[in-house]
Amino acid sequence: MKAEVAALARDGDLRPDLTPERATDLLAGLLSVSLRAHLTREGGWSRDTCVDEIARLAKKALMPDG
């Protein structure tokens, strides 16, 4: 995940108020197995919906025009 965040920062696509370390922490939380398990098992979300919504949240959380 650090490499992906570093690429966002290098390309100017990381929110300016986020450090790469904080962005990596956010991304790790969004991609956690426990979040996916909660949404799919307990929330009844489909796998596709889960992936789509987590991707949308990650973009909003990390990118300035998210």
Image: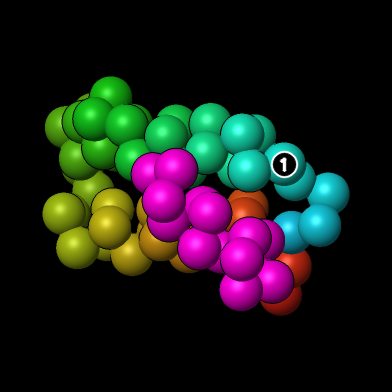
Q: Main secondary structure of the magenta part?
A: helix
Along the line of sight, which residue is nearer the eye, 12 or 23?
12
Quick check: 58 above or below 65?
A: above
Q: Is residue 9 above or below residue 20?
A: below
43 and 11: which one is in front? 11
Left or right, 28 with respect to 5, comes to left
Q: Residue, x 74% and y 59% (percent of image)?
A: 15
- Local packing at callout 1 (Cα closer than 10 Å; few below 14, some 14-19, many 20+) is some
View extreme (right): residue: 17
Position above or below: 2 against 62? above
Q: Label 1 sits on what residue type?
A: Thr
Determine the image quadrant of residue 40: top left
Q: Secondary structure at mark 1?
A: loop
Relative placement, left or right, of 18 versus 43 is right
Residue 35 % position (x, y): 33, 31
Q: Residue at x 44, y 32 (%)?
A: 29
Residue ranking furthest to the top:
34
Judge whether residue 49 can be spotted in this image. Answer: yes
Is residue 11 a member of the stretch shown in magenta? yes
Q: Which residues are magenta?
A: 1-14
Quarter that holds the N terminus: top left
For label 1, the residue is 19
- Tell which residue pokes out farthest to the front in this image: 10
Q: Is residue 65 magenta?
A: no
Q: How far across and down, in percent of the image, does residue 58 sit? A: 50, 55
